[in-house]
Image (cartoon, coloured by chain):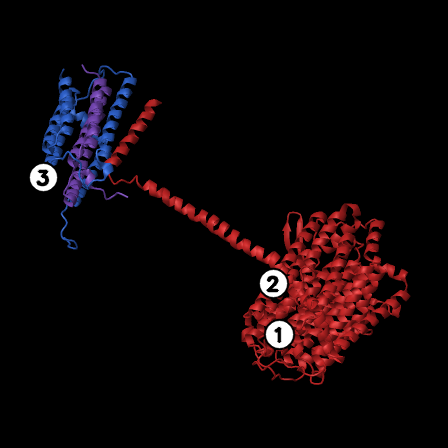
Amino acid sequence: MLFYLFGAVAVIASLLVIAQRNPVYSVLLLITSFGALSGLYVLLDAPFAASIQIIVYAGAIMVLFLFVVMLLNAPHEDTDFDERTHPMLRPGPMRFGALLAVALIAELAWALARSSPLTTFTNTPVTSIQALGRTLFTDYAFQFEVTSVLILVAMVGAVVMARREDAPGGKR
Amino acid sequence: MPSLNDYLILSAVLFTIGTAGVFVRRNLITILLSVEIMLNAVNLTFVAFGRAFGTVDGQIIVFFVMTVAAAEAAVGLAIVIALFRHRESLNPDAFTALKW
Amino acid sequence: MMLLLIPLFPFLGFLVNACIGKRLSKSAAGSVAVAAMVASFAVALTSVIQLAGLPEESRHITQTVFTWITSGDFTANFTLRVDPLSALMILVITGIGSLIHIYSTSYMHEEPDSEYARYFSYLNLFASFMLVLVLGSNFLVMFVGWEGVGLCSYLLIGFYYTKKSASDAGKKAFIVNRIGDFGFVLGVLMLFVTFGSIEFQEIAAKAATMHPELTFGTLSLATLLLFVGATGKSAQIPLYVWLPDAMEGPTPVSALIHAATMVTAGVYMIGRNAVLFSLAPDTLMIIAVVGAATAFFAGTIGLVQNDIKRVLAYSTVSQLGYMFLAMGVGAYTAGIFHLYTHAFFKALLFLGSGAVIHALAGEQDIRHMGGLKDKLPITYWTFLIGSLAIAGVPGLAGFFSKDEILFKTYEGGHMILWVVGMLTSLMTATYMFRLVFLTFWGERRHAPAGHGHAAHGHGHDDHGHDAHGHGDHLHDAPKPMAFALIALTVGSILAGYIGLPHALGGSNRLEKWLEPSLTAPHVVAAAGEAPAGEPAVAAEAAAEHGEEHGEAVGAGVELGLMGLSSVVALTGIGLAWFFFVSDPKRSESVAQSFSGLRTVLLNKYYVDEAYNAGVVQPIRVTSEQVLWKVVDVAGIDGAVNGTAESVGGLAELLRRVQTGSVRAYAASLLLGAVMVFGYYLWR
């Protein structure tokens, strides 16, 4: 029952995300969607995932998005195509992309139809954070460390990318 | 009790929505948001499978995916800011420097 | 071993003069060249003496210098071989060659130092190649020499390359020779395919032992092709056209190359392969006819030419015709004999004409000469003796050799050819003495003022004198030139005596000497079986059929014919006297009445023009219109450029994929993913 509720919220919110003109609305709707997903994680006996979904995704990443939207004073999207764009880039690829998305879901559905239906969850779930922590720091220790390097690199990269250039020739 | 299949279907639907969003929207930030939707769909798949096999690996993978998604969002937004400064537009079609 | 030194000395002389000649003084450069030739002569003489000491059946000395080609079963060595025939040749080449080198040191003296050295380097190189040609023991080595002398004749004829007529003449010589060489190569290849070897001795032995019916067709064709090569090199119809133009070169060059050596290469080649030619009587017939026709034809042209060197050039063509006539009737010894005597007196005549030209500061037209008899005594007397020799006056060398040829023709039963030969003999005497009388006798007829050097159509050899029309330095030949002239005169007188026929009491030593070279080898090399008696004897008989008949016809006929030749010679001289000395106007009136014929003769029967129209222009037009414009420009360039352009065009099309639209790229990504996914689902 709860599954259908959360599921519906997630799907509808996502649909609205891509339908909205105002980017701020999009971000907020996405947060809603993430919340629903978090609920789904709880249903799947994955409390840890649910927590970090809210904390990291909804709490940090989306806030970051919001910051950027506000910072850039992102204009509303216009419906007509931009005059500057190449004729071939007007609605064409867009429609093509949408078509491909439909094709994609068709394929996915087909894939699912062909596979043997796994019905209920039979195994006992592992819910303890302890177990998770242990696996994380032993089996996946290397990946963990690498991920930390990745975050460092991303941080540096983001700072470099977003830096405001001075007048040409000027050094910082 | 929903079966694994249901979760997978849900995940597929979300993924497709995200894909459509990448192509349909003309705002760079919204495109990035669509990418996030896709990533979340994938996360859902992993957790579902993790639960199905009774292991904790699903959640660990989710952990990593989330981290990477965060990093990617940060860098992506930095690029968007840089691009915006250049062209005063968030329309991806405005950036045609790679054209022949 | 010694044989290699014979061509090597002149080759070293070439290297020295070619590399450092510019820095050498004239006397040094000249001395190097002369010394090389004299040294070569010394070695040649030693080898010949050594050869003579060997018993008759094995009279040959061989030296393999190096192995040149080994390919599967086939081996070709660079082997030199001296036997009686080549012994005679090397003595002629080195002996007369040395004299001409000595003459040249004085004749070319007004050239600048670098040109002087260049001249001698080419002259030495020529001698070296000619010696290689003659000493080669297989077709390959001979061909090296064959081509080499062709090259050197190009270099030397076109020596004054800044003058267009000279460089054109050089090209003409080379190209016409090449045409002949093509036939030659085909002939050699045919022989190789048939007999599996390129060694002269091996081919001769195999040909002699094989059943005649099997080889007849091949041999006839192969020898005919070889003869084509000979027509090119030795200036017979149809490839003689280069030789008159070759007079553009310096006069000593004409003496060496076009009198004594290169042009004799064809005759030598036939003599060398006498066994093969004897087995192909049809070819021999063709050779005889071509020889006689050429002799007659060239004689008629020589009668009316006005340039002293041209007269001698056509005379050379004519005498070569005699040699080929001899070869064609099977009288190989007679042909070689005439080659040998001709070398002496023709070289003498050319060098003499050179002395005249030198004294008259470049004048070559005999209509502007005259009265030189007392002013240039040495030149006059040597030239006179040379002319007597070539005319066939008894007692001098030319008489014996020419008479031998005519005799053999007669007794071989070729009456028409004999008559043609006699007529040509008459003409020879006439035109030669026309030349003598107009050049040396009477009063000096100077060229009209302002005529000077420039106006003559055919080039002069330019001495670098100033153009004095009348101011010639009329002194007789300087010492080196005189020395050569006198030495050659002695030769012209005495050389004939080695071939003194039996009828006059001599023993015809030349014939005996040359015999081993002209017959099939009995003791064969490689397979080394003594051939069955009959075929060998048959071949030998065939080779000597002319000679053997000689005894049958009888000494009386021979003497009679000799008497007839002498009468003909004296008649010719008399005719020349009649027309040109006793009453000069007579020649004019005859000229008027036969003016049409005269014009034809003066223009050499328009053969050059015919070749130009028939061969040269079509090739040129084809090359220009078809090969150049169509094949090269449109075809090849079109293909190459077209490829480049099509690549460019293709790239132009493919470029449009780069739309610069990020979304399009993303779309294609998705498309790819969908397709891959679909593919796996399908499976």
**Does residue C18 sit above or below C291 in this rendering?**
below
Under mark 2, the amino acid is: Lys
Above or below — where is C313 with respect to C580?
above
* Element assignment for label 2: helix
Q: Is residue A146 above or below residue C130?
A: above
Label 3 resides on the chain identified as A
Q: Secondary structure at mark 3?
A: loop
Q: Residues within 10 Å of mark 1 (few under 14, many from 20)?
A: many
Q: Which residue carries the number 3 mark? A: A73
Q: Nearer the viewer, residue C643 or A153?
A: C643
What mark, if any, has residue C32 been given in the picture?
1
Determine if marks 1 and 3 fall on one subunit.
no
Task: Measure the alpha-carbon separation of dots 2 and 3.
Answer: 91 Å
Residue C172's disc number: 2
In this structure image, what is the colour of chain B?
purple
Which chain is depicted blue?
A
- Residue type at mark 3 is Asn
CA distance for labels 1 and 3: 100 Å
The N terminus of chain A: image quadrant = top left
Residue C89 makes an appearance in the image:
no
Disc 2 with disc 1 on a shared chain: yes
**Is residue C188 among the parts visible in the rendering?**
yes
